[in-house]
Amino acid sequence: MSLLTPDLGLIFWMVLSFAIVFGILAKFGFPVITKMVDERQEYIQQSLTNADEANRTLESIKQKSEELIEDAKKRQTEIIRQATADAGQIMQKAKEEASALGKQKLDEALRLIEMQKQRAIGEIRSQVAALSVDIAEKILRHQLDNTEKHDQLISQFLDEIEDLNIAKN
């Protein structure tokens, strides 16, 4: 027996033992191995499907969040615009009310000043009239003591009245 060329009996027993081991593996081992490989392949495929679904869901959520952010920005802009407009209206209304109130107070103050002015003028007139009467009375007493001066005064008053009537005509 040589090391390089095997004997026919050895080859026969090796082929027979290989066939038996192969048969046992084909009957019991290969179905289990292929079943495990198929299950693993199905698990990987399911994981890829789930990952793809998760990516689509994530993309949908991302798009919805961007839409919500954009909507929030639009609403914020609208709220700011409305608040600015409302502030302008409130300020305008406050100015108008202040102006109306100021005008009312000014009119009231002017009316009060006019009333006080008329009252002061009335008082001054009554005082001037009283003083004039007192002065005239004193002058007339002094003048009436003397009949010559009395006649002269009457004549002067008549001339003045006559001059006024001529000036009016």
Image: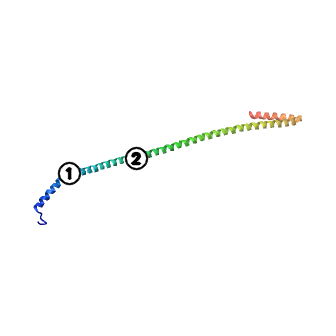
Question: Which numbered tag is attached to residue 40?
Answer: none
Give the residue at mark 1.
28
Query: Circles 1 and 2: CB distance less than 8 Å?
Result: no
Give the residue at mark 2.
65
Q: Is residue 114 left or right of residue 149?
A: left
Q: Secondary structure at mark 2?
A: helix
Q: Is residue 118 left or right of residue 98?
A: right
Task: From the top left corner, tell me how far across and down residue 110 is, in percent.
Answer: 67, 39
Closer to the chain start, of discs 1 and 2, is 1
Task: From the top left corner, tell me how far across and down residue 56 is, in percent.
Answer: 34, 47
Q: Secondary structure at mark 1?
A: helix
Which of 91 and 31 lies nearest the eye of the viewer? 31
Q: Label 1 is placed on what type of residue?
A: Phe
Task: From the top left corner, tell me how far across and down residue 82 is, in percent.
Answer: 49, 43
Q: Is residue 63 left or right of residue 132?
A: left
Which of 44 and 158 lies nearest the eye of the viewer? 44
Quarter containing the C terminus? top right
Q: Label 2 is placed on what type of residue?
A: Ser
